[in-house]
Image (spheres, coloured by chain):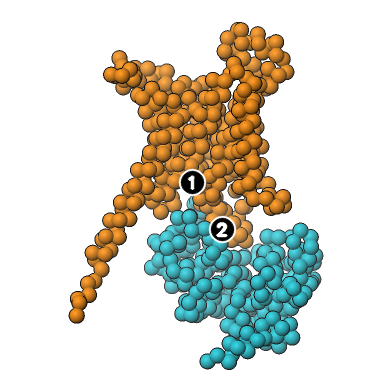
Amino acid sequence: MTDVGGAPSWHELWSNLAIFKDAIWVGGLAGALLGAIGVHVVLRRMVFASSAIAQAAALGVALSFWIPALIDPSGHAAGHAAGPAAHVAPSLLFEPVLWAIAASLLATLVFVANPVHLHLTRESLLGFVFLASGAGAVIVGDKITQEAHDLSAILFGSAVVVEPGDLYMVGAATVLLLGGHAVLWRALLFAGYDPMGARVQGMPVRKLNVFLFLSVGLSVALCTRALGALPVFAFSVLPAMTALALTARIGLVFVLATLIGALSGVGGYVVSFRGDLPVGATQTATAAALLAAALAFRFVLARYERRARTTSAPRTDAA
Amino acid sequence: MRLPAGERLLSTDALVVGHEGAAILPPLTMTIAAGELWAILGPNGSGKSTFVRTALGLVSPVGGKVEARPGLRLAYVPQQSSLDAIFPISVFDFVLMGLQGPGNVTLLGGRGLGARAAAALDEAGARALARRQLRDLSGGQRQRVLIARALATDADLVFLDEPTTALDAAAEHEVLQLIETLRAKRGAAVVMVTHLVEDGLERADRALLLDRDHGVARAATAAEVRALPEFARVYGRFVARSEATP
């Protein structure tokens, strides 16, 4: 049963939940994981980083399709003839998620390295990673026309259904990395806010930063493979911004960002289903809409508080 | 545990500081002892920050060595401007950072941490600010909170980077009093990078004069530093002018 206009109904979503539930889970888990980690990304002014890493992950996936075809063109063509499942992952060596992780970790090295020695800023190197990866993904994508649909899904996200393996990997990453961040959030905060003070007090700032950057790299790689680069970038920035707009209590910021990320992932999927729209775009739009609502709330609250202050201020009678 | 006054905390032996292997100051030998107040003086770009970072072990020396007393507890009070206002950090959460270190990286499972942070805020006269955001405070209030975190560390040696920059006269006096408390009550040694030449030398036991352009790195008592010809060359006319001003 569909609604007027041909859009799938709630009943259809419910009755086919068994088919879609893995994708909904992945959306929710990825949103929660990236939402929590995103608080550090936003506070440390590394917003561009997750975008650059997601682009690098997308290039990694594109390369995993293209290189087998380059090495063995006839075998690859035979794979196409045999069906889609035969060529997408011809062997473990060319498993897209491994290439996504490898490319993401390479991009993550930009954070760990000290670009001052190159007389460059970290932002400029991230710009380089973003542009080189983006251009590379499009060029490689042009060479692998058969998998063009897969590449488009990786770049913009159209995860109507996901592989069970993606769910397991994103689920495991969420449990492990979110657990690590729950334990280390205060330490990571100290290392980001006052790195010199933290080092003087004997905090392992370098190790904490490596943990943060690796967790950004891994989570972005795994989630990009499952959802696409666009929603992954959105989840690693927008829920944190929304939480920061709603509260100044830092512990609550992390909790809210996690919940808002999960809501964006699941809500965006449902909106996509009901509106018959691309999943990655609706997940991104949902996260953006929540941020817009939070900013509007802040604006109204600030006006109300200003008015309340003006009203309660003591009056001076004119002489 | 309070260390006896005069106990050696940190010393440098022919220490040469610099960038990427290039020296920017001549070799320096000095000893910081428990309970001492040091003022680090010098014009902008004189090498003060490089010296502090090297003494704190954050940067490798170009030559010579820095020796710290085994188990020395260090604290660093940054310049206010180096703390990013985008971070939503409450005063209480900031002071809790003073309790983090090798023995308690995560602050999980530590007992009485809240009480220790509250006591440090009390001592700094900032208890009423505990729930406020650090970024919303005035310069003087914020500096008190920064020093409260140093109090929470229970450090033997505290480095303060320009603690009175951009403060009005009243706030400046308050902060200098608080630094005196840090030294007198806690017995900590305090090393203060300061642009307040007169106040710095008046309050400090010892001073370090740095001037990269003229190759000066001299550590001595405050009175001796004031009498140095190098001091007169850098500050003479300014000090004379300020002394002449009522």
| Front-lying residue, A54 or A207 | A54
* Residue at point 73%, 85% (across, down): B228
| Front-lying residue, B72 or B241 | B241
From the rendered image, report the letter of the chain displayed in orange.
A
Question: Where is residue A95 drawn, in percent x and y?
Answer: 62, 22
Q: Is residue A276 above or below residue B125?
A: above
Q: Is residue A305 above or below residue A93?
A: below
Q: Three-letter amino acid code at disc 1? A: Val
Dot 2: what SS?
A: loop
Question: Where is residue B83 drawn, in percent x and y?
Answer: 53, 60
Task: Left or right? Give the position of A181 relative to B131.
Answer: right
* Residue at point 42%, 63% (across, down): B136
* Residue at point 35%, 24% (across, down): A274
**Residue under circle 2?**
A194
Question: Where is residue B168 drawn, in percent x and y?
Answer: 48, 77
* Mark 1 chain: A
Q: Three-letter amino acid code at disc 2? A: Asp
* Residue at point 72%, 15% (across, down): A72
Is residue B124 among the parts visible in the rendering?
A: no
| Front-lying residue, A82 or A18 | A82
**Residue under circle 1?**
A39
Dot 1: what SS?
A: helix
| Front-lying residue, A304 or A18 | A304
Task: Left or right? Give the position of A318 relative to A120.
Answer: left
From the rendered image, report the letter of the chain displayed in cyan.
B
State the CA–CA distance, disc 2 to disc 1: 16 Å
Question: Where is residue A137 drawn, in percent x and y?
Answer: 61, 29
What crowding class fits label 2: few (fewer than 14 Cα within 10 Å), some (14-19), or many (20 or more)? some
Mark 2 and mark 1 residues within 8 Å of each other at the beta carbon: no
Q: Is residue B219 above or below residue B113?
A: below
